[in-house]
Amino acid sequence: MKKLVIGSTGFMGSSIVRELLKDGEEVKILLVKDRPTRSNTPKLDVEKVYGDIRDGNSIEKALKGCDTLYLAAAYNGHWAPNPKTFYEINVDGTKTTLKTALKVGLKKVVYTSSNNAVAASGPVVANEEKTFNFWKAKDHYTMSKYIAENEARILAMKGLPIVIVNPTLVIGENDSTPSPSGRTIIDVIKNKMPGYIDGGLNIIDVEDVARGHVLAAKKGKVGERYLLGNTNITVRDYLKLIAGIAGVKPPSLKLPFKLALTLGHIFEFVSSITKKPPLVTASEVRIAEMTEWYDCSKAVNELGLPQTPIDVTIRKTINWFRENGYIRK
């Protein structure tokens, strides 16, 4: 039976496809017809079907001949020209797709949620059991993923054999868009990041996250969530690590929270006119202050989640960006 990957043209989704192909699986991917996209999977040996996660009929057709669904599609990022887009895709699209999966009957469903649907750590490192507190960030992406995960849990209680995975900040090769995390690395190397604010991140290699999805389908407990992450690090040390590996100077200006928040609002206002993503949003500043450090031992112990050292991942990522013309060699 085939494995259907939805969100396969994205950074994380394309890596899931590659991991499945490594295992010798037959893979089907869902594409949105007539939508221009920078695909990460043009040369991979997969079956292509067309549809939309908000259209249950197209999902039902796509699932024919499949026993497993990987739902990795989402409107990603912390800004959109119209905030409703986050809820139309991340909530309505997820609910429609998972309801269809329940209807047709599958062996397993792996839903890609986010650490933002769990909780910020604050003074204590968070795990899967910590109560959601990201509402303080006033962030549409975060709220949409939180609501969508709750919909997934409801369907699990109705019999959907679903496992939820919650990746942290993902970096790695084949980031062709690039993703927000990839743009951070590029901006540091190009000296386009004027400063930073206090905060903490959890970083993981995209190949480890993809392998975590495959392991979740094989070993994950139905109805459970698994944080897919690796190393907790401060924002300052992360930027220094990127700069050190790339051989450039790291951002040295530490911005006070209130100033950073004001800049976020200004950048968002400019983006409302230009329709181009802001350098940083006010909600990202609020999230950064809350700190995103996680205990991911559940996924390591129960699934066997790989833990590639982040300096190795950063080096691979930088080399890929250089080899593909994003950064000068």
Image: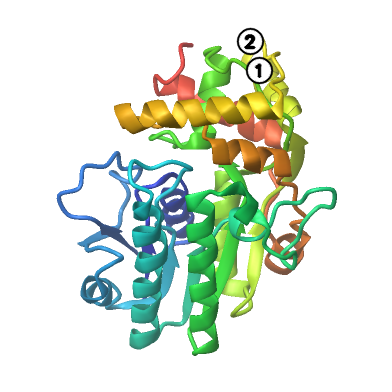
Instruction: Name the side, left or right, on which 109 lies relative to 64.
Output: right
Quadrant (top left, top right, bottom left, bottom right) of the N terminus: bottom left
Q: Residues within 10 Å of mark 1 (few under 14, many from 20)?
A: many
Instruction: Name the side, left or right, on which 3 lies relative to 134.
Output: left
In front here: 48 or 31? 31
- Quadrant in which residue 236 is drawn: top right
Q: Residue furthest bottom?
A: 158
Q: Marks 2 and 1, how far apart in space?
A: 5 Å
Give the residue type at disc 2. Answer: Val
Q: Secondary structure at mark 2?
A: loop
Answer above or below: position of 300 versus 1. above
Protein image colouring: rainbow
- Quadrant in which residue 58 is drawn: bottom left
In front here: 225 or 200? 200
**Residue at figure coordinates x 48%, y 59% from the top left:** 144
> Which mark is on residue 243?
1
Mark 2 or mark 1: whose residue is earlier in sequence: 1
Q: Residues within 10 Å of mark 2 (few under 14, many from 20)?
A: some
Residue 270 makes an appearance in the image: yes
Instruction: Name the side, left or right, on which 52 lies relative to 12.
Output: left
Locate residue 44, reporting x and y percent.
32, 49
Answer above or below: position of 102 versus 136. below
Locate residue 268, reporting x and y percent.
44, 32
Give the residue type at disc 1. Answer: Ala
**Residue at figure coordinates x 46%, y 43% from the top left:** 77
Mark 2 touches mark 1? (CB < 8 Å): yes
> Which mark is on residue 248?
2
Locate residue 53, reporting x and y percent.
31, 65
Residue 278 makes an appearance in the image: no
The mark total stands at: 2
In front here: 129 or 48? 129
